[in-house]
Amino acid sequence: MNGRGNMAENEEGGAAADGAEAAPPKNKLKLIIMVVGVLALLGGGAATWFFFFRHGGDEHHAEAAPPPKPPAFVDVPDLMVNLAGSPGERVQYLRLKIVLELKEEKQIEAIKPTMPRVTDIFQTYVRELRPSDLNGSAGIFRLKEELTKRVNAAVAPIQVSAVLFKEVVVQ
């Protein structure tokens, strides 16, 4: 019996020793899971604050900014020119009503003395166009870009934001 009792004690003692050694890894695993869970909750709370509450403050600051000044507009005298064509073709005419968009109203008075130069530059450029240059929206867009570039060179240092068409007629 002593032999068996020792053996049983050894088995039980061995099981108790194994259980004592096995318990710390389970506790460590639980501890790691709890730490990861706490970090996930903190990260989720921080993300919620960042996406929902932080932007609300930015919008408040954006509303406090003064509204931008409306642009100013200047009419250019109407243009009517004949388009370049091949000999023997029917002569076609282009009629344009143009408005210049400026950033500030005070630039209107500064640009008025240069209006004869602007009209001359526009007529000189437009007279070289062929009817095929004005086909479709791409042709009109190219015309607008070219006129904007030329008017900015003519009225520098004033900056024209855009050349706007009120009317474009090819007859």
Image: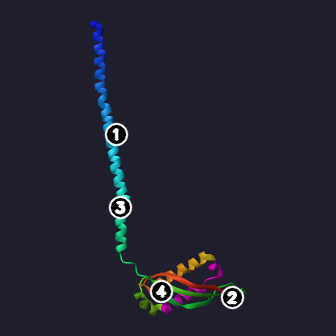
Q: Earlier in the sequence, mark 4 or mark 1?
A: 1
Residue occupied by mark 4:
73
Q: Image quadrant for the N terminus?
A: top left
Q: Earlier in the sequence, mark 2 or mark 4?
A: 4
62 up-or-down from 51: above or below: below
Confirm whether the magenta stretch covers residue 131: yes
Q: Amino acid at mark 2?
A: Val
**Principal secondary structure, stretch drawn in magenta:** helix
Q: CA distance from mark 3 to mark 2?
A: 66 Å
Q: CA distance from mark 3 to mark 4?
A: 41 Å
Asked if the residues shown at circle 1 and circle 3 are in contact, with their CB atoms under 8 angstroms apart, the answer is no
Q: Secondary structure at mark 2?
A: loop
Instruction: Examine the rendered structure and indicate whether residue 92 appears above or below residue 54.
Output: below
The residue carrying pointer 1 sits among few (fewer than 14), some (14 to 19) or many (20 or more) residues within 10 Å by Cα, namely few
Name which residue lies at 67% across and 84% down: 85
CA gap, disc 4 and disc 1 = 67 Å
Measured in 3D between alpha carbons, the distance from the residue under mark 1 to the one under mark 3, in whole angstroms, is 29 Å
- Residue underneath mark 3: 53
What label sits on residue 91 in the rendered view? Answer: 2
Secondary structure under the numbered disc 4 in the rendered image = strand
Residue placed under numbered mark 1 in the picture: 33
Residue at the outermost top position: 1
Tell me which corner region of the image, top left, top right, bottom left or bottom right, holds residue 110.
bottom left
Q: Is residue 44 magenta?
A: no
Q: Nearer the viewer, mark 2 or mark 4?
A: 4
Marked residue nearer the N-terminal end (1 or 2): 1
Q: How many marks?
A: 4
Q: On screen, 34 above or below 117?
A: above
The span shown in magenta is: 115-135
| Residue at 34 percent of width and 74 percent of height | 64
